Image (spheres, coloured by chain):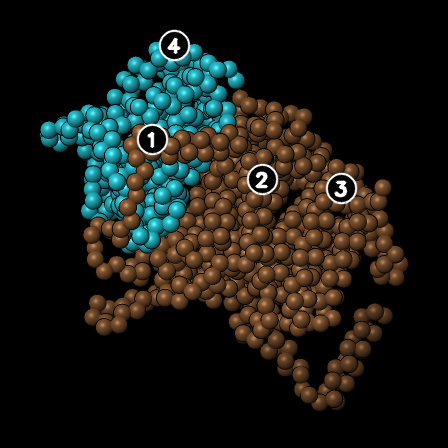
Amino acid sequence: MSVGALFSQLLQVAIALALAPLLLGWVNQCRAWLANKRAPSLLLPYRTIHKLFTKDAVVADNASPIFRLAPYVVFGAMCCAAAIVPSLATALPFARAADAIALVGLFALARVFIALAAMDIGTSFGSLGARREMFVGFLAEPALLMVLFTASLISGSTALPTIVDTLAHRELAIYPSLAFAGVAFTMVSLAENARIPIDNPATHLELTMIHEAMILEYSARHLALLEWASALKLFNYSCIGLALFVPFGIAEGTNWLAMLGAAPALIAKLGVGGALLALIETLSAKLRIFRAPEFLATAFLLAVLGMLVNLLLGS
Amino acid sequence: MISPLALIGVAIAAWLAIGAAGLARPRALPLVRTLFPLGALVGLFVAAVAFVALGLPPQVTVLPLGLPDLPFHWRVDALSAFFLILLGLAAAAVSLFSAGYFRSGEGTAPGLLCFQYHAFLAAMALVLVADDAYMFMVAWETMALASFFLVTTDHRIPQIRQAGFLYLLIAHVGAIAILLCFGVLQGGRGDYTFAAMRTTTLSGFWSSAAFLLALFGFGAKAGLLPLHVWLPEAHPAAPSPVSALMSGVMLKTAIYGLLRVTFDLLSVQIWWWGAVALALGLLTALFGVVFAAVQTDMKRLLAYSSIENIGIIVAGIALAILFKANGKLLLAAIALTAVLYHTLNHAFFKTLLFLATGSVLHATRERSLGKLGGLIHRMPWVAWLALVGTLAIAGLPPLNGFVSEWLLLQAFLFTPSLPQSFVNMLVPLAAAALVLAVALAAYVMVKFYGVIFLGRPREANLAYAHDAGPRERAALALLALGCVLLGIFPTAVIDLIDRVNGLLLDTSLARTGESNWLLLAPIATERSSYSPLIVLAVIVVVVVATMRIVRRVWHGRVRRAPAWDCGFPLQTPRMQDTAEGFGQPIRQVFEPFFQMERHLPSPFDSEPRYWVRVSDRLWEWLYVPIARTAERVARIVGLLQRGRIAVYLTYSFATLIALLFLTR
């Protein structure tokens, strides 16, 4: 592994870390515009994270070390995922260490840790949130894997760089299996990133919250890391979606100049994607928690259908 | 050089001797506490010998023991050596734990327990080295009986006796099927050695009969649907080290038997066996995990989780059969590697978790999840070591559970077009079901760990819970270390497993894959690769660096305060989610699976009570009708019973006349 490749790898993670809060800010801005409100600043997430870092951490009396460790593990898993997801370039060295299945595993690791941390204090909301998060996860995770499997059946590989290379170089045609997978992926991303219709990132209404319920007890730097991690998660999911369904413009090879050249394309694609996310969120209403399985089971079945279509039609 | 078989014979004799020594003074606890660590050493010795034997060609010997004219045959080859390693390592950890665990006054006297325990270990080792049907059945039955006595250690409690009998019954139904299977396999030649069975070629019909009998017989031992009912009864009844040994090792002897019959004794495999086993395995996996999610007893939860894992393993075996039958040996090797890897993993993390529940049980005298909580503060050692097992069994990278699931998914994904179009459709659906089961397992394990170790104690007397003793801690630590090492050095483990591939499939992953010590790539790095060590290193580096940087750039001040919880006052531990609460979404989604009785309080109740009982529909659908029929038949047969000697003499006379008439 050359130094240049390592540098490109670090560059990609650094860009992901830097852009993630911006994406979140952009989505929030779009949501505000669509709701006819005055939009908050694009840089608000950065300010929030900085503000939280400067505050004193308040930890519940009976918190165990797991509670304090969890934000770091979640953040670490998300950074790791940001290194795997081909957002700017495909041939990065770290992508060899973990393929699509390991990527889903990393997301699961983060989920399990945050759920355990939520149960640690022993408050009613914490355990409620943990239960709901695992509940959403057990359907969303298989659906995500099925989407990735559809793509890997097309390319004959579970390595993300190979998948993206294959998808980027095919002729422009509509693949029915990918269409199914695309819809399923959108649904999974909404659920996994705690967006409407499954969860509402802006709510603190007890009966409806999932993700927010789990992190109620967190403050200061722990909360900052968790906020940053969830921004990174949104960024990672967006990049997976872009890499699978609109892989054009991504840099091939590890040349960091090519990567910087790919950055504007990525930012443009993320801009459109973020606006679409805000549109979906504005147009839909939040589902009751017990409608969530139907939503996610639909996503799962669509993804499985995609796989079957791929086997039937060979495309 | 001494043959490994002789050394394993010595180890088996040593286990029996240790057991007999315990029998000499059954009530002497200090004696027993020194005997168990000796048993652990023997376990390590077995593992070491088997490790050597794994690299050697098959060793065969004929014992001067056995029935007249039917001497016992022993053989150790790569397959049995692999399972002997598993047995040795798990037995070492469980024995070490038992040295600190068993005490007087809990049912069976410790010395007698020591004998039963070591006889159980010896019988399992004998099952693995048996090379003829007689030896195998004798060892198999000894194993069943020894474990029956171990399960009924607390035999004064009627429920435990009941659980023991259920286990014994199903074990014997399974044993009959295995016996019949060997009967089919000898192909009418009357030679019951495995060597003779290997050379017999059976017709398609008889091969299928042998396979189905083996699947039924070994499935009964392993807990395959619908013969799984004994697991959730017997595991909670048994003392925890025994549950650990039964779940971690004994179920694996059934997997061993299934592999031995399918890939070694039968010379050809037929593709539809794979389809049947795949459906059965995945059904078992889903069934097990869904039931695990709604359990409120921690050991029952783990028992159902064992059913799930056995389902996954059988699904893997099914895949290997499918590939082998279609001549795709490399893919069969990947599937078989995944099977054996998962078998080994399950032996480690399930043993770890069962032992941890043993420590919790001793510290709190409580098995019900609804009365535990917050034990991470009182029992930090057990809690942190159990966390490793929990993350491993939930299939999270970079621990060991993930590696085997990764391999199995690779086998599923690279199913090339098989000639049977039906199977081509089945495989993606099977992959979906597998992934669903694995994701649900994470749900179950968060529930298991969160309710026992995290949160606030749900009962006042949990404040007196104490951490496990030094020997118990050491055993748990060994198993946790095993989970980590198996997780981060997969290629080393796969190199070992590859010897079994060489034996059973005549192929090897090493020749084709691009793996090295750091990177696991069973086919080629372009197709798929995974390096747990790098993933672990990156996560650790990021975590440490983030901690440092946050402290350097901002600060590291911490203040302790009461929990906030949205500002609600009067928080009590009863307001946390219970095990029932955590299982509620699963109960709702998978309602058709369960038979539920629920009592909901009315709003005007002054003392509201809520209870729900979830039971298995298969009881109602399968076991109760069988029991009723058996009862009815027994009643009819009972009519013959007159209690007068003259009547019985008439029966004998009539029988004689009938026989004479028939044979003439």
Q: Position of residue A215 (x, y in %)?
A: 29, 43
B54 up-or-down from B383: above or below: above
Residue contact between numbered discs 3 and 2, judged by CB atoms under 8 Å: no
Residue contact between numbered discs 2 and 1, judged by CB atoms under 8 Å: no
Q: Which chain is brown?
A: B
| Front label number (1 vs 3) | 1
Mark 3 to mark 4 CA distance (whole Å): 55 Å
Q: Amino acid at mark 2?
A: Leu
Q: Are discs 2 and 1 both within one chain?
A: yes
Question: Looking at this view, is B555 or B36 the one in front?
Answer: B555
Q: Position of residue B513 (x, y in %)?
A: 62, 26
Question: Looking at this view, is B74 or B45 the one in front?
Answer: B45
Q: Give the class, few, some or many, for how many residues have Cα within 10 Å of label 4's Cα (few <14, many ≥20).
A: few
- Colour chain A is painted in: cyan
Mark 1 to mark 3 CA distance (whole Å): 55 Å
Q: Which residue is mark 1?
A: B552
Q: Secondary structure at mark 3?
A: helix
Q: Give the class, few, some or many, for how many residues have Cα within 10 Å of label 2's Cα (few <14, many ≥20).
A: many
Q: Secondary structure at mark 1?
A: helix
Mark 2 to mark 4 CA distance (whole Å): 40 Å
Q: Give the class, few, some or many, for how many residues have Cα within 10 Å of label 1's Cα (few <14, many ≥20).
A: few
Residue contact between numbered discs 2 and 4, judged by CB atoms under 8 Å: no
Residue drawn at x 21%, y 25% as measured from the top left:
A43
Q: Which residue is mark 3?
A: B53
Q: To which chain does the residue with label 3 belong?
A: B
Mark 2 to mark 1 CA distance (whole Å): 36 Å
Answer with mark 2 or mark 1, whichever residue precedes in sequence: 2
Q: Are discs 2 and 4 both within one chain?
A: no
Task: Check residue A257 in the rendering and tell me which mark sits there, or answer none.
Answer: 4
Q: Amino acid at mark 1?
A: Arg
Q: Are discs 1 and 4 both within one chain?
A: no
Q: Which residue is mark 2?
A: B486
